[in-house]
Image: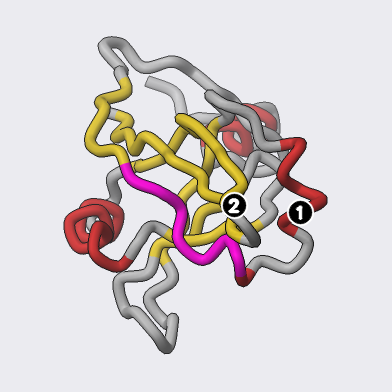
Amino acid sequence: MGELDKSKNNDLVALLHNKGGSLDIPKPFERDIFLFKTHIAGTSFVEGIEELEPYLQVDDKLDFFREPDNPYDKRAIVIKNADGVKIGYIPRADNKIFARLMDAGKLLFGKIASKEIQGIWLKIDIAVFLRD
């Protein structure tokens, strides 16, 4: 077999290593597994949450990111909307297993199940999923 000529295949190599572009190839048998229903903690501490609220809709996908250096919770999982804006956290009482799964490389995400303004608090219920 001949050697791979990198000069002719730079675009392919960059694509395979996710440099300079993205390629979203569906995996066979990929599925989203519902794990748990909870709420978003800390929404009352998010600056500008009142302006953001109208843009948060039921079934919107939410991205989860580990925050192991969080001074209040070493298992913290921050929740961001599709635009990358932080809207809160997985509650501390619920994050132990989820943090372990994420630390092991599993992809977890959420979807907004409901939202309700209760006084000065924006209560957002979410469903947590594991992409398998």
Mark 1 in CB contact with mark 2 (< 8 angstroms): yes
Left or right: 107 in relation to 80: left
Q: CA distance from mark 1 to mark 2?
A: 8 Å
Q: Quadrant of the N terminus?
A: top left
Residue 25 sits above or below residue 51 on the image: above
**Residue 55: horizontal and vertical position, in percent?**
75, 36
Residue for point 67% across, 50% down:
84
**Residue 96: horizontal and vertical position, in percent?**
20, 63
Res. 81 image quadrant: top right
Res. 26 image quadrant: top left
Residue 11 sits above or below residue 86 on the image: above
Residue 51 sits above or below residue 61 on the image: below
Residue under label 1: 50
Residue for point 28% across, 45% down:
106
Q: Which span of residues is magenta-colored?
A: 38-44
Q: Is 40 included in the stretch rendered in magenta?
A: yes
Type of residue at label 2?
Leu
Nearest to N terminus: mark 1 or mark 2: 1
Type of residue at label 1?
Glu
* Label 2 Cα crowd, 10 Å radius (few <14 / some 14-19 / many 20+): some
Residue under label 2: 122
Residue 75 sits above or below residue 77 on the image: below
For this orientation, the residue located farthest to the top is 28
